[in-house]
Image (spheres, grey):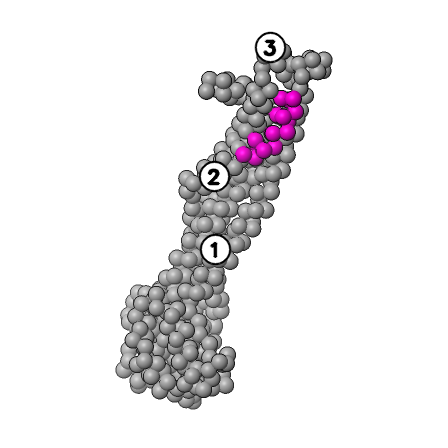
Amino acid sequence: MGIFLDYWKMAFFNIRSNKVRAFLTMLGIIIGVSSVVAILSIGNGMSNFISGSLSSMAGSYFEVYTNGSKPITTRILDNTVEKFDSITGYSEVLAFKATAAGLKKEVEVKVESGNEMFKGKDSNEIIAGRYFDKSEYDLAKPVCVIDQNGAKEIFGREDVVGEFINMVAYGREFTAKVVGIRKAGSALQSMLFGGPKIKVEMPASFVNELFGMDPDSLYDVLLFVDDPENAVEMSVKAKQYIAAALNERGTDMVKSYELNSGIAQFSSILAGVTAFVMLVAAISLFVGGVGVMNIMLVSVTERTREIGIRKSLGAKTVSILWQFLIESGLISLTGGVIGIVLGYLFSFLISAIIKAAGSVTVLPEFNIVMILVVALFSMGIGIFFGWYPAKKAAKMTPIDALRM
């Protein structure tokens, strides 16, 4: 154990004696490690943020829709709810763009409509007023719920319960009374779903009357379940049942979608992108390793006389080998530690830039295992690329080394 401690001391002394050269040798390792740590921590933080945000948006429902050739009748939907205990109800989905008269100018809004259960489509809570109820739906009342963005954009303030919004869509003018305010969606929701940033929710019965549509012919519906975990299973079963009821079994006319499966796919894609970018960043580690090999070859050349003296005094080949391997490993380990610290700082800097650019808070995720693996890997790079110079030094004979 004592001899290895001496090797570490010798390696530290040689590195300290050539500080600038040692730092330049470490630079490739530092850049590679800091890049890997920053990308991995931000990637994990982004994955957690997106998964958490999408999970809160998913809710206890799934969507069933047709290609437009055949409608889904309310009778089929009633039978679907009756057949499957986990399905608690359904709501039609009617969505279109409209123009609303704002405080200073006309603004574009997205009108989404359904029945009273449509409230469960959005996980953002009602912060003022209430949602429209069954009686308002049955009577096709012109009432609506808007989000905070809509309230500010149209009225210039948020406390607008009881106010009226004048809108125009497809040449039809209509006015709706605001009965509730919903919390504004996150920046992630706006980024993923796009479209107008102002959302207005209304009873679908009113929309049907406004445009003269058949309330019994539905092409897009939400079916709600008693537990979010049942959404995937019920999505498949309800799709098959509805397709059979429409005599479309085995065709692609009826489709279903639930957000939980989309979350899994999105997370998988994000993990793949993170791994690819991290792999590209890791290439600089190998470039740094080549730098370690180069400087160790120079070191061996400079210290041939020292090697010759040590071997003439009885130093074994393995001792010379360990001396140079430990030195190359120490250079890489030191660079790795510096890279980990810089990667830690860079990840918070990137997080701050993301927040400033998109109002999204992504917290970097670190764990001790990741730090240890990166540190050991960087040390391993040094040992791997330092093997050839160390082997070359160890094979020297005392006479040849002293002649040089």
Q: Residue at x 57, y 35 (%)?
A: 381
Where does residue 346 sit, x and y in percent of width and height?
50, 42
Work out whether residue 29 or residue 195 is closer to the camera in this orientation and state it. 29
Q: Nearer the viewer, mark 3 or mark 1?
A: 3
The residue to which callout 2 is attached is 373
Q: Nearer the viewer, mark 3 or mark 2?
A: 3
Residue that protrudes farthest toward the top in the picture: 313
Residue 131 vs 284, above or below: the answer is below
Residue type at mark 3: give it. Answer: Leu
Q: Nearer the viewer, mark 1 or mark 2?
A: 2
Secondary structure at numbered mark 1: helix
Judge whether residue 381 is colored magenta.
yes
Numbered range of the magenta stretch: 380-395
Q: From this viewpoint, is residue 355 visible?
A: no
Estimate how packed mark 1 is, as few (under 14), some (14 to 19) or many (20 or more) residues with alpha carbons within 10 Å: few
The residue to which callout 3 is attached is 313
Residue type at mark 2: give it. Answer: Val
Q: CA distance from mark 3 to mark 2?
A: 39 Å
Q: Residue at x 64, y 34 (%)?
A: 290
Residue type at mark 1: give it. Answer: Gly
Whichever of labels 3 and 1 marks the residue nearer the N terminus, that label is: 3
The residue to which callout 1 is attached is 358
- The circle drawn on residue 107 is none
Secondary structure at numbered mark 2: helix
Report if the CB atoms under discs 1 and 2 are less than 8 Å apart: no
Whichever of labels 1 and 2 marks the residue nearer the N terminus, that label is: 1
Where does residue 300 sit, x and y in percent of width and height?
65, 22
